[in-house]
Image (spheres, rainbow, N blue to C red):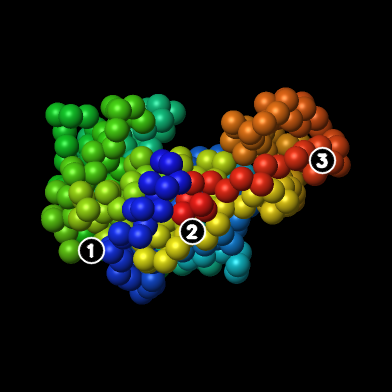
Amino acid sequence: MRSYDVLRFFKGFNMAVDPIHIGTERLNVPVALAPMAGITDRPFRRLAAQLGAPYVVSEMVASREMLHLRPLSAIRLKTQDDEALAAVQLAGCEAHWMAEAARRVEEGGARILDINMGCPAKKVTNGYSGSALMRDPDKALSLIEATVEAVSIPVTLKMRLGWDETTLNAPQIARLAESAGVQMLVVHGRTRSQFYKGVADWRAVRAVVEAVDIPVLVNGDITHPKAAHNALTQSGAAGVMIGRGTQGAPWLTGQIADYLQGIAPRSAPMGDTLRDMVIEHYEGLLSCYGTTIGLRSARKHFGWYLQGRPDGAALRAQVVRCDDPKAVIAALAAYDWPAIASDIADAA
């Protein structure tokens, strides 16, 4: 969206989202950072929260994997005091293991637990987890009930419209989830069969909103403030969840939160501020994972941060091949980060 288009839209903006309750938790601005595998780890969640994200969700963790205390699972689950309101997302296909993992998550200090019934990845659905559960509402209900009964913290659920166009059963599962004690729903406006193809159908989410009394957030293709406004208008949802649009832009969730409160969005980092943020993110990954895994994890983020920037491809090629953290930081510091605001920042 061109900057003057965003500015014109902002000046005429009159929608304000209301606070919602997720069980005992109050979310003043219902704008959330979506769980994304390999992305919304602790360093990214912390950064997004610092940049204004009101609510963040951990990347998905398999219930059995977490119970076996694999190191990366433990890292994914950790939260910090300086994060926003945070949830831990679990995936699984067996009620017993989901309940056990839920208890472990609560014992670890989590404030909210989210159940994954939306992941379309084959390695997840082939194990009858994620969105595969939408093909079997009875099994989904047994898993939800076991999870809710295992903990005292609020439980939420993220799902899709259905498995495919012939099974658009999100409203049915939403009612079952509400009856089992789920406190909030998030609906991605695609079926599992669509993966991320086509466009998200925000209007279809309205059927879920109308089926339940608990808050519903709409998710999918919300990459700028006007998209958030349109998604809310078309779905009737109480708030939005932002996913892939934050790749390379961890400030986006905070900007949309500002926008939906009717205030000018905070500026996107640029120039030296952006340079320092990228280096901080990189150092956070190294601290969280150690040098070897941290270097590997940083590569995708470098690609997103540098995409479309002058000489960005050359810098990316340099830093992803380097296994010396000091040399990577030196290269990032020496790069002339453009002092050009994003469209949203221009509008502010």
In 3D space, how far apart are the residues under numbered discs 2 and 3 (Cα atoms)?
A: 29 Å
Nearer-the-camera pick, 300 or 229: 229
Residue 3 shows up from this direction: yes
Question: Residue 304 appears in which quarter of the rendering?
Answer: top right
Left or right of residue 96, residue 249 in this image: right
For label 2, the SS is loop
Q: Earlier in the sequence, mark 1 or mark 3?
A: 1
- Given residues 174 and 69, the one toward you in this image is 174
Query: Which of 313 and 22 lies nearest the eye of the viewer?
Result: 313
Classify residue 284 as left or right of residue 181: right
Expressed as whole percent of the image width and height from the top left, the position of residue 166 reads 14, 29
Vertical placement of 300 versus 57: above or below? above
Q: Residue drawn 46% across and 54% down?
A: 347
Q: Which residue is mark 3?
A: 334
Circles 2 and 3 in contact, beta carbons < 8 Å: no
SS at mark 1? loop
- For label 1, the crowd category at 10 Å Cα-Cα, with few meaning under 14, some 14 to 19 and many 20 or more, is many
**Rendered residue at 26%/34% (across/down):** 191
Residue 13, position as x, y percentages in the image? 31, 60
* Earlier residue among tags 2 and 3: 3
Residue found 73% across the figure and 51% down from its top: 272
Q: Is residue 90 above or below residue 87?
A: above
What is the crowding at mark 2: few (fewer than 14 residues within 10 Å), some, or many (at least 20)?
some
Identify the residue under disc 1: 214
Residue type at numbered disc 1? Ile
Q: Quadrant of residue 114?
A: bottom left
Tag 3's secondary structure? helix
Three-letter code, disc 2: Ala
Three-letter amino acid code at disc 3? Ala
